Amino acid sequence: MIETQTAIPDRATDCGDCNDSAVIESAARELYQTAALFVGDETEALQLVEETVASVEMDPCADGEAARGAASHDLVQRALVRVASLRPAEMHPSTAADLGGCVETDDLSAAGITREQLTGLLSGAGRLRMRQWLEGLGPVERSVFVMRAVLGRSGAESARLLQKTTGDSWTEAHVGGAYRAALCSLASSLVHSAA
């Protein structure tokens, strides 16, 4: 699982490092990258990060894991709300199409890609190609892909987050269909780029 980092150090970090600018810059960059995967727009992503950092009121030195989890959860909710507000008609369970046949399971490897390859596509030389591919997805498939493949959220958790942020009746089946559609698209994109 690729976990989104926040400006909150983990438990292994000495509390004296809480104000270390390098740690804060790295965490802010990672939050920004996650937000950008959701919304695609740099200005929107920056605003989401600023709102998230401002809203998480926990002492990271007292409980870094709780603060990290709260910031990550807050960012995901804010990103989903933003996407739903920008494209409300397209951010509905009825648009979560299961294309069937191409990818049969909710497993990243079903698209013929490993975690290491995904990490390379997200942060390495393939980053531009990955962002272009994400831009071609609908908002449901994009959001579900980011939650499931990038953040490692379960289908049930993703459905709960979508239901909470959109007010619609999302199910694991809706999320699974959207995720398989995204994985199928990714597999196709990788085959075409290799040719």
Image (tube, rainbow, N blue to C red):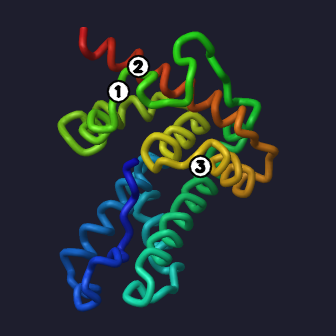
In whole angstroms, how far apart are the C-alphas of marks 3 and 2? 24 Å
- Image x and y of residue 83, in percent: 59, 49
The C terminus sits in image quarter: top left
Residue 87 falls in image quadrant: top right
- Tell me which numbered mark, 3 or 2, is placed earlier along the sequence: 3
In whole angstroms, how far apart are the C-alphas of marks 1 and 3? 26 Å
Q: Amino acid at mark 2?
A: Ala
* Residue 113 circle label: 1
Q: Answer few, some or many: residues within 10 Å of disc 2's Cα (few below 14, many 20 plus, some between 14 and 19).
A: many
Residue name at image x 18 percent, y 75 percent: 22
Q: Amino acid at mark 1?
A: Ile
Q: Is residue 80 above or below residue 63?
A: above
Q: Is residue 151 left or right of residue 84?
A: left
- Image x and y of residue 98, in percent: 65, 21
Q: Answer few, some or many: residues within 10 Å of disc 3's Cα (few below 14, many 20 plus, some between 14 and 19).
A: many
Residue name at image x 32 percent, y 60 percent: 30
Q: Which residue is mark 2?
A: 187
Of residues 12 and 79, the one nearer the viewer is 12
Q: Are marks 2 and 1 in contact (CB under 8 Å)?
A: yes
Of residues 68 and 146, the one nearer the viewer is 68
Q: Which residue is mark 3?
A: 83
SS at mark 2 in the image: helix
